[in-house]
Image (cartoon, rainbow, N blue to C red):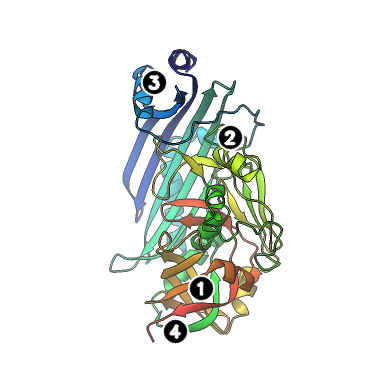
Amino acid sequence: MRKLFDHICSQVDDAELYIKRDDIISIDIKQGVVKAVDGKNVVGLSLRMNNEGKAGTAVSTSLEDKSIVERAIISSQYQTGDLFNFKHIPSEPVVCFDEVLVRKTSEELILLGKTLNDRIKAIDDTIIFAISVIRTISDVSIINTAGLDDSYNKSQLTISIETMSDAGFVQTSITESYSKFFEISDELLKDLVHKHQISTHVYEVETSRMPVVFSGRAMGSLMTRLLAGVNGEFISKGVSPLENKLGNKVASDILSVTDEGRLSHGFQTMKFDDEGIPTQRTRIIEKGVLKNFMVSVSTEEKLGCSATGNAQKKTMFSKEIEDQPVIDSTNFMIEPGVTSDDEIINGISHGIYVDSVMGTHTGNIPAGEYALNVGIGYLIKDGKLVGKVVDSMVSGNIYEDMFKIEAVGKKLELMNVVFYPMGYSPMVKFSDINVIGSK
């Protein structure tokens, strides 16, 4: 890495070289039969540089590829953005690497999946389901002309389960992901099976305002709007409703939200972000009051505050080496409340429970607006989930609906947003949300 970087520095004024190596094993199991075992090693290099008053970028897959600097110089002739600002801020170690997980062989990961299969069958042997196990070991390094030269290792295990109807449609699903080895709990498996079983009872709902409970994983569809609202880039452009709201009440007293870049064994825990800025714990909302925005190096000056370690090579639909760093969450978290999930559901006489949605990426996201088709949802009647809700939507604006939060559960789940998770959240109950049904 140093040899290539020295060559780059001899050609340009300022530079940053980012390298990520991934060792990935993925396993797919359906009905106890291993359908696929894939292994791959991926190496990606990303160069950002300034030369003669212009910024340029290029990517490669080899440390021997000296043409990366030539291609970056050529790209600078066609780019019109600001010059890159490279920094050197020392990072403290984080806990995102697990030797136990690293030592797991393909055979052991297959056994993990097969054992999980047997545990589900022991609860209900009539269910059709699929299991995915993905283990990733990453090595991330960054070096720049400001003096930064740092690296860290990261491990990650993701386990997903989907149950299917007789027609082959997904009935229920769960996904768990951490940077350490773990197993799915019996409680979670029993809940998955129960939801699958009651899905044979189908209900239509009326169009009205009613209590709505979002599962932790479904909260990602709402929190991606809050994430956009506290995005320093949107703040600097004046397109966020939260632009002048720091220190103001923006939600119910029982809502507290943080971005936990240094969460022990979190799925997105990292030592530094993709600009080399140390990650941190950023309090976004504290007991309903807006406390901080999420800031990148490029927005520091505009907002008059320091970068929060939230720049990532990621878009809503991709996580590729060629993606330029943008502001995004690490482990975006809704802090657990004091009410159990059972208590939340038991307190509702008529409402719906939303477990997944379709259309998260649609609508005016920075403005907080949403209109989401309920992908997997259940009717709540007399304090119980009684069956699957079909042909329904939920709609509103999170900057209004965050004031309607009445209860926050205790148990954290992985929040999903389109193709990628964004953090962890417990179950959240809203007093009333606009539900559009087919009755």
Give how far across and how far down residue 432 sits, in percent: 57, 78
What's under tag 4, amino acid-wise? Thr
- Among the two numbered marks 3 and 1 on one chain, the one whose residue lies closer to the N terminus: 3
Name the quadrant containing residue 216.
Answer: bottom right
Separation of marks 2 and 4 at Cα, in angstroms: 47 Å
- Among the two numbered marks 3 and 4 on one chain, the one whose residue lies closer to the N terminus: 3
Disc 2 secondary structure class: loop
Q: Which disc number belongs to residue 69?
A: 3
Disc 3 secondary structure class: helix
Give how far across and how far down residue 354 sits, in percent: 49, 70
- Which is nearer the eye, 244 or 204? 244
Which residue is label 4 attached to? 207
Which residue is label 2 attached to? 272
Q: Which disc number belongs to residue 353?
A: 1
Residue 165 shows in this picture: yes
Height in image: 257 above or below 40? below
